[in-house]
Image (tube, grey):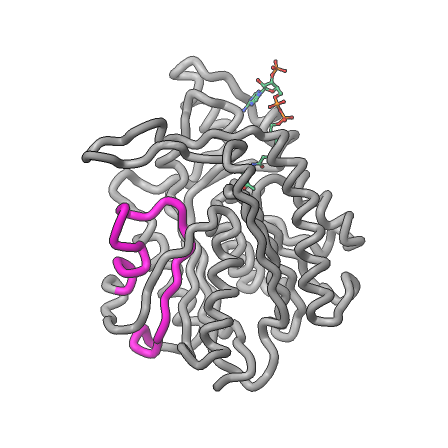
């Protein structure tokens, strides 16, 4: 049985269609919805996002990210013995996006399942993969966050539709004798279901209720800042480390103001904060692995760096994973 699990490769993928705030404002104006680059940048830090083409699914984006992560790890798809996909926008009600992605990778037999924890999905998935590797249930896992949030946006609600984008990120997590994942801290509190949800569901072949995203932005903001600090501190305590040991903070990329407040609460200089929300928008479960891969490939994050990954999202769910990269 392995003592540790460690990230050995990262990958990501963005659909080619990129919309700046100005592009989105023009598109929304055509339906009488007013917004501006100035408002979006000031309140969120977002400048642009990517939207998938209508025939492109969550598993398609995840497949591209997974191929890139496998290549970075120097592995073949056939080496993988566990696939976990974090998503809230799967291709189908069932089977899982993970099963569909497994088939696209041309492999069969290994366990494959989805985790639904909205924007905390990736830290949940990484924690589950780490636990499975440590118990010997797997040795080479693909952990993927992939979303097509553009499909569940209400483009008549300017307070939400400007915030999100589509994309995917992936890591290969392997059994290791040297420490990789150092500690995790996961939580949920279902009483907050109403402040961020997609309340529709399928029944009798019909969508019942509203299948588009609803959010109380200010309530989400307040809750997010508090839980991101507490989860990070709990993960640090479990690893007998302090905030000063963190080289890079990679919070869920929802909103620059939430991210900066979290860094300040953790007494980290803003130079240690990884920011990709400006270019990707909020890609929910994909945002952390996308930010991680972007920073690894740009040379910012180096082997041996200590990373704090943090998610918060609908449920409410939240959590942190502290790791040695
Ligand atoms: N363009 C122009 N004006 C807008 C827009 C827009 N896109 N959206 C809202 N407004 C207007 C409102 O109509 C309102 O106008 P009014 O004063 O005339 O009524 C004004 O701006 C202020 O609206 P608020 O909703 O109060 O704006 P707020 O400052 O709270 O910012 C925001 C909204 C950005 C959503 C903020 O609450 C926030 O960042 N919340 C965190 C939520 C978040 O990041 N969620 C991501 C998903 S959850 C997650 O991933 C964890």
View extreme (left): residue? 205
Total numbered labels placed on residues in the image: 0
11 versus 138 height, above or below: above
- On whether residue 110 falls in the magenta region, the answer is no
Q: Residue at x 69, y 68 (%)?
A: 238
- Judged from the image, the quadrant occupied by ligand 1 is top right
Residue 311 in view of the camera: no
Q: Is residue 290 visible?
A: yes
Q: Based on the displayed image, in which of its 4 quarters is residue 301 positioned? A: bottom right
| Picture quadrant where residue 104 is located | bottom left
Look at the image and say whether residue 87 sits in the magenta stretch: yes
Q: Nearer the viewer, residue 145 or 131?
A: 131
Which x, y percent locates residue 310?
61, 54
State which quadrant residue 98 falls in.
Answer: bottom left
Task: Decide if residue 1 is on the left or right side of residue 89.
Answer: right
When the figure is inspected, residue 181 is found, relative to residue 259, above or below; the finding is below
**As displayed, is residue 316 above or below residue 1?**
above
Q: Relative to the observer, which residue lies in front, 220 or 245?
A: 220
User: Which of 125 and 47 lies nearest the eye of the viewer?
Assistant: 125
Q: Looking at the rendering, in which quadrant would you find the C terminus? A: bottom right
Which region of the structure is painted magenta?
Answer: 76-102
Residue at 50% across / 23% down in the picture?
158
Across and down, in percent, residue 226 comes to 70, 44
Q: Position of residue 135 (x, y in %)?
A: 47, 79
Q: Indicate the position of residue 276 as horizontal and vertical percent values.
A: 57, 48
Q: Residue furthest front?
A: 191
- Lateral position of residue 80 relative to residue 322, left or right: left
- What's the residue at 47%, 61% (across, down)? 125
């Amino acid at each position: 049985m392995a003592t540790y699990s460690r990230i050995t490769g990262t990958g990501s993928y963005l659909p080619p269609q990129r919309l700046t705030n100005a592009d989105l404002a023009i598109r929304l104006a055509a339906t009488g919805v007013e917004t501006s680059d100035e408002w979006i940048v000031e309140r969120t830090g977002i400048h642009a996002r990517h939207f998938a083409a209508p025939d492109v699914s969550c598993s398609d984006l995840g497949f591209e990210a997974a191929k890139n992560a496998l290549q970075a790890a120097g592995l073949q798809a056939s080496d993988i013995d566990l696939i976990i996909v974090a998503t809230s926008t799967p291709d189908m009600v069932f089977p899982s996006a993970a099963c569909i992605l497994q088939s696209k990778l041309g492999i069969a037999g290994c366990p494959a399942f989805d985790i639904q924890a909205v924007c905390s999905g990736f830290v949940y998935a990484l924690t589950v993969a780490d636990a499975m590797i440590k118990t010997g249930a797997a040795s080479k896992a693909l952990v993927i966050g992939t979303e097509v949030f553009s499909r569940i946006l209400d483009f008549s609600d300017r307070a939400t539709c400007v915030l999100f984008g589509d994309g995917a990120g992936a890591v290969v997590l392997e059994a290791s004798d040297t420490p990789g994942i150092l500690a995790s801290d996961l939580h949920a509190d279902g009483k907050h279901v109403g402040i961020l949800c997609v309340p529709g569901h399928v029944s009798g072949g019909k969508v019942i209720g509203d299948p588009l995203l609803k959010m109380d932005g200010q309530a989400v903001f307040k809750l997010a800042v508090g839980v991101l600090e507490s989860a990070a501190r709990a993960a640090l305590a479990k690893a007998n480390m302090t905030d000063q040991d963190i080289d890079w903070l990679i919070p869920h990329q929802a909103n620059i103001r939430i991210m900066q407040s979290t860094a300040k609460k953790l007494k980290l200089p803003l130079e240690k904060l990884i920011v990709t929300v400006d270019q990707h928008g909020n890609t929910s479960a994909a945002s952390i692995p996308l930010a991680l891969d972007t920073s690894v490939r740009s040379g910012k994050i180096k082997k041996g760096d200590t990373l704090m990954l943090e998610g918060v999202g609908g449920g409410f769910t939240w959590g942190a994973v502290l790791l040695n990269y």
